[in-house]
Amino acid sequence: MIKNQLCYPFDERLLEFCRNENQTLVYIAYGKNKTVNGAARALGKDVSAVSQTIRSIQAKAAKAGLSENFDARRHVPQGEQVIGRSVFTTDDEGNPIWLKTKASIEKQQEAFRAYIEGLTSEIKPLPKVKTPKGKFSEDLMSVICIGDAHIGMYAFKPETKHSDFNVNIAARGLRDAIDDLISRCPPSETGMLVDVGDFMHANSSHGTTYSGTPLDNDSRYSRVLEIAGEVMQYAVTQMLKNFKRVICVIAKGNHNPDAAVAVQQITNAYFHKNKRVEVLKTFGFFHYVEWKGHLIGVNHGDKIKPQKLVNVMARDMPEAWGRCTGSRMWLTGHYHHQQVLELDGCTVFKMGALPPPDSWHAGSGFGGDGKMQMMTLKAGGGTHSTMIYELPRPIIEPDLKL
């Protein structure tokens, strides 16, 4: 008998919480075979992958109010949903009280991890892309920067007076920008893809930022996350066709610190068997890459002023700071407009953003510049070239012409 046979309570009602055909097949197999190990054998899958899939389904059901012993949905009026839980009890003196509770941060993170583990366990590593032929300069590295992509944001042109925006427009725009920039880059041996944060608009299926700010969202969260993973996979694949080596850095933003980790894990699941790809699996807010005299830092730029970023780099990377006399730079986002700040010992680049403003930002007078950037660095210091991809500026007509 196999030790540690993982058993979760099977409940046929959980089938409605399976987000795709694979999850449905796994859960049906679990019901028929009674154990996770039995389901794994029947499907020819890894036990841990099956376990993670079941945990992901259960977490989604629990969030909707369905648990092993209770279905809270029966007590909710039609058209409404469960948003929390209250507990009736008594205080130390016997007085009746109601306590309103919610899952702890640790519990929420555990559920989110289970969801991501279930998602990534279903991803099969992509076939290897042939190494491009031709002459490539080992002394050049091209850095493509994705600034605040906000995949999943919804914008309605008649309301914002800028451009419509949804998950499909976001994905198409990113693919077009990546294709254009790659087509114009010099023959660099190394390519680096940098997401400076807020690649996804919302942090979770609650449809809010990490801090809980409500957002204008397009589509279901699971679909948005799936498309975000597909866009990142497309970008890395296109770079593999044009560079001998690809580095991928995915930073947390103020909108999506947890979702950024999810996209990072999904991207790694696609490419972890490809020796030409390095996905940085760092979970903090500051990321560093040293390349031939250049020290490159990546941070979203929302919590810390540019001058302090310089101090952070010198503090975190004192030895690399001393080695990299060619250039030291920070790649940041958040403001949706390109800007270059030359500071003492370091240059801070603020990246532009392709998305138009949503309702809140348009109403507050904010908007993006519709730009995406690639810079090619030379070994030892200096920049070989800089390329800008820019969307056509929307023409805003007066509401009334007399």
Image (tube, grey):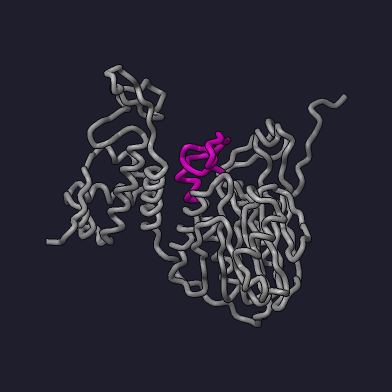
Quarter of image, res 385? bottom right
Assess whether residue 208 is covered by the magenta stretch: yes
Q: Measured from the top left, where is residue 24 in percent x and y?
A: 30, 47
Q: Residue at x 62, y 53 (%)?
A: 300
Left or right: residue 94 compared with residue 344: left
Residue farthest to the top, as pictured: 95
Rendered position, 402 above or below 18: above
x then y, percent, for residue 182: 66, 66
Give the magenta part as a residue range. Answer: 201-227
Quadrant location of the C terminus in the rendered image: top right
Q: Position of residue 128 (x, y in %)?
A: 47, 72
Residue 178 seen anywhere in this rendered image of the structure: no
Task: Classify residue 224 as left or right of residue 381.
Answer: left
Q: Position of residue 203 (x, y in %)?
A: 51, 44
17 vs 321, left or right, is: left
Confirm whether residue 234 shows in the render.
Answer: yes
Q: Residue furthest right?
A: 402
In this orientation, which residue lies closer to the viewer: 87 or 64?
A: 87
Depth order, front residue of 48/288 = 288
What residue is shown at x 28% (from left), y 19% (from top)? 93
Residue sitting farthest toward the bottom: 135
Q: Give the residue at x 27% y 60%.
A: 45
Q: Quadrant of residue 153?
A: top right
What's the residue at 38%, 22% (across, down)? 78
Q: Magenta segment: does it hold 329?
A: no
Residue 3 location, quadrant: bottom left
Compare residues 158 and 308 and report the one nearer the observer. 308
Between 246 and 378, the one nearer to me in the picture: 378
The secondary structure that dominates the magenta segment is loop
